Amino acid sequence: MTAGTRPEVLHLYRQIFRIARKWQAASGLMEETIKEREYIVDEARKLFHRNKQITDVAMIKECTEECKARIEIGLHYRNPYPRPIHLPPLGLALPHSKVFRAQEKLRKQAKPVYLKSYDEIS
């Protein structure tokens, strides 16, 4: 992390924890609220910890944009969980076929900005 990006990253990190502290589940149930608050905190810690060794300014910028997008989407839809990815047409090829590589490329292109930190497996 460079000196120029550090304040922005720390601001986002603090903002996420403030949001988690004030979060109310859309259903209004306390159990769901607690579960969603824990998810927000755990997800933030996991992703920030995973990305803390990044030093490339462009990559840091991409990660902060992803973070901002997830914050906005979560606040707008009142749902802290990532939205599902649209699978392109014919996106379910057999893993052994030639079409699989091309469709894998399509899947990567279809991945929205707010899910760039996730691997294909997670």
Image: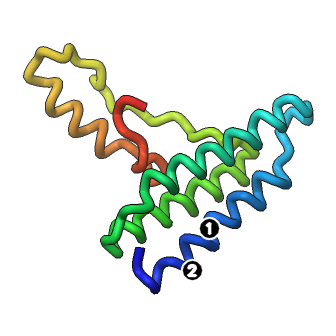
Q: Which residue is identified by label 1?
A: 12
**Residue 118 at x, y = what percent?**
42, 42
User: At 30% across and 36% down in the image, what residue appears?
Assistant: 107
Q: Residue furthest bottom?
A: 4
- Colour mapping: rainbow
**Residue 15 at x, y = what percent?**
70, 65
The disc label shown at residue 7, or none? 2
Count of picture labels? 2
Quarter the N terminus occupies: bottom left
- Residue type, label 1: Leu
User: At 42% across and 71% down in the image, what residue appears?
Assistant: 61
Relative horizontal placement of residue 108, taking residue 70 as reference (left or right): left
Callout 2 crowding tier (Cα within 10 Å): few <14, some 14–19, many ≥20: few
Secondary element at image label 2: helix
User: At 32% across and 28% down in the image, what residue appears?
Assistant: 89
Secondary element at image label 1: helix
Q: Residue furthest left?
A: 98
Decide: is 83 above or below 66: above
- Residue type, label 2: Pro
Decide: is 66 above or below 101: below
Decide: is 30 above or below 37: above
Quarter the C terminus occupies: top left
**Residue 21 at x, y = what percent?**
82, 54
Relative horizontal placement of residue 117, taking residue 27 as reference (left or right): left
